[in-house]
Structure formats: structure tokens, C-alpha cells
Image: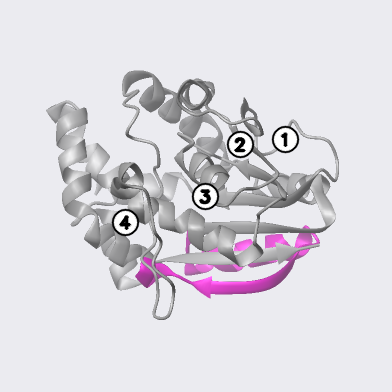
Amino acid sequence: MFPRIFMSLIDIPFFRTIFWKPVYNFMADRFPNPDWQLMNYGYFPGTGETHLHLEQKDEHHRYPVQMYHYLASLAGIEGKHVLEVGCGRGGGANFLYNYHKPGSYKAIDIADKAIEFCNGNYRGDNLSFVAGNAENLPCPDHSFDVVINVESSHTYGSVDKFLAEVKRVLKKEGVLLLVDMRSTVNRLKLLKQFGDAGLTIVSEEDITENVHKALKKADSFTTDRIGNYFPKYIQKYFREFAASKGSYMYNAFHKKEILYWRYMLSM
């Protein structure tokens, strides 16, 4: 019952505005484990996609990392100026910076404690982490070739403001790469928001099955990590947050009540 009530609450913009920043600050402050670097649900490659070769130290992040690899491969970010909005604990930014070799990579998150975590754990001459709001980006106009947004837009009070900011900071030929979950009704709303913002869909893909399979493959690792990191009294909530087997979100993906889509958009 609680997950259903919560999912109905996050449809309310005001609730999203006041809820998510303290939650992510709490996690970064209370659970600063340096090997917990990514929080997206992950991506299992489809038929014909090449196997991603990772260094052994990165292997336990395989499925969340593959989400970033899948996205970046669509646009070819090598040598480009990249902005990530909603970088969380920064593991995706660190992976793309080291494996895909962008010219520069700036990562922004509203949770200042998460940014402190990132700056304490990652280094790169052209890699930077900055606290900032997705609806008011601390970036100059027309300064990025690519904007990346991974499983973050559903937490924003105003997706319209976020998209307007993306359009402002993108260069003329720039692209937005976005992956996130939506109900069928809210996906239609998101498509309208793209159009209202003056963004055109270059390509799109329903990757719900890829995400659900990644969750299934990673479940034993996720369960062990929750058991090792978190006190017993909150473990059930983190299993819901992580979409572990049997959770509301895990089952919603399986039943296609919630869909997970990937978009590439241009101006």
C-alpha cells in the first residue's frame, strides 16, 4: 500500500520539489560508501549490442554503467562538451569521462552532499561536479554539445523549466539524451512537454524490458549491498527504492504499468 501512495504523491509537483533533495542529501551524508557510485536501475543490452569491457574494479557496477554507455554511444561524446543534470553519486559521470573521453564533462546535482561525495571520490582535469538546480542551471547559454539526464526528470517540480534550461545551454546542433520512467499517461504528458519546449525527438526506444532484466540480474548484489549498508529498520524501504525483486516498481515494470523510455532530442 505504501509504495502506491508514494507513487501517487510524486505526481504532485510541490511534493517532488520538497521531497527529493533532503532524501538524496541524507543518503550521501549517512551512507558515504565509496563503492556505491550509481543509483540508476541499470540496462541489460539488447540483441546485437556489443559487450561492454570494463576494468575489474568497475565490474560490480556493470548494469548501471551500461545505461550510461548505451546513452553515450548514441551521440558519440568523445571530444565533446557534456553536461549531466542529476548526476547523483557521480559514478556515471566518472565512467563516461574515463571510458568515452569527452572534451569536458560537467555534472550537476541539487543535493550538495552528493556533490561533496563526488568531489571527494573522482578526479579529472576536465571533470567537474557542481551543486545546482535542474530548473535553473548554473551554466552559460549555448555551451554544451550534449546534455545527459539519467532517471532524474521524474523528481523535478517543473519538467517544463528543466527542458527550457536544456534548450538554453545546448549548442545549435546539440542533443539531449534522456532516460526515465513514466506511466502511460505521464509519458504522453512528457511527449507534449518536449514539443512545447521546442525539442524534436530524433529517436526513442522503450527499454522497459532491458531495465527489468538488469534489475533481475543484479538483484542478489543489490540485496547484499542493502543488507551490508543499511540498518534493518529501513532495509525494506531501500529495497523498494532500489526496485528489488518483489518491490512495487519491479513488478510495475514486469506488468508494463510503468514504462522506461530512452529519448534523443534536438532543437
What amino acid is labelled 1 in the image?
A: Leu
Do we see residue 199 in this rendering? yes
Residue 102 is situated, as x and y percent measured from the top left of the image, at 65, 47
Disc 2 target residue = 107
Residue at image coords 49%, 27%: 118
Task: State the mark number for residue 231.
Answer: none
Which residue is disc 1 drawn over? 137
The residue under label 4 is which amino acid type? Answer: Met
Q: Which residue is mark 4?
A: 249
Q: CA distance from mark 2 to mark 4?
A: 27 Å
Label 4 near label 1: C-beta < 8 Å? no
Circles 3 and 2: CB atoms closer than 8 Å? no
Q: What number is the disc on residue 99?
A: 3
Mark 3–mark 4 distance (CA, rounded to whole Å): 30 Å
Q: Amino acid at mark 3?
A: Tyr
- Which one is in front in this view, the residue at disc 3 or the one at disc 2? 3
Q: Is residue 2 visible?
A: no
Q: Which residues are magenta?
A: 181-210
Lower position in the chain sequence, tag 1 or tag 2:
2
Residue at 61% x, 36% y: name it: 107
Amino acid carrying label 2: it is Ala
Q: Which residue occupies 52% across, 30% down?
A: 18
**Disc 3 from disc 2: Cα separation:** 16 Å
Q: Is residue 139 magenta?
A: no
N-term-proximal mark, 1 vs 4: 1
- Secondary structure of the residue carrying tag 2 is strand
Between disc 3 and disc 4, whose residue precedes? Answer: 3
Tag 2: Cα neighbours inside 10 Å, few (<14), some, or many (≥20)?
many
Give SS at disc 4.
Answer: helix
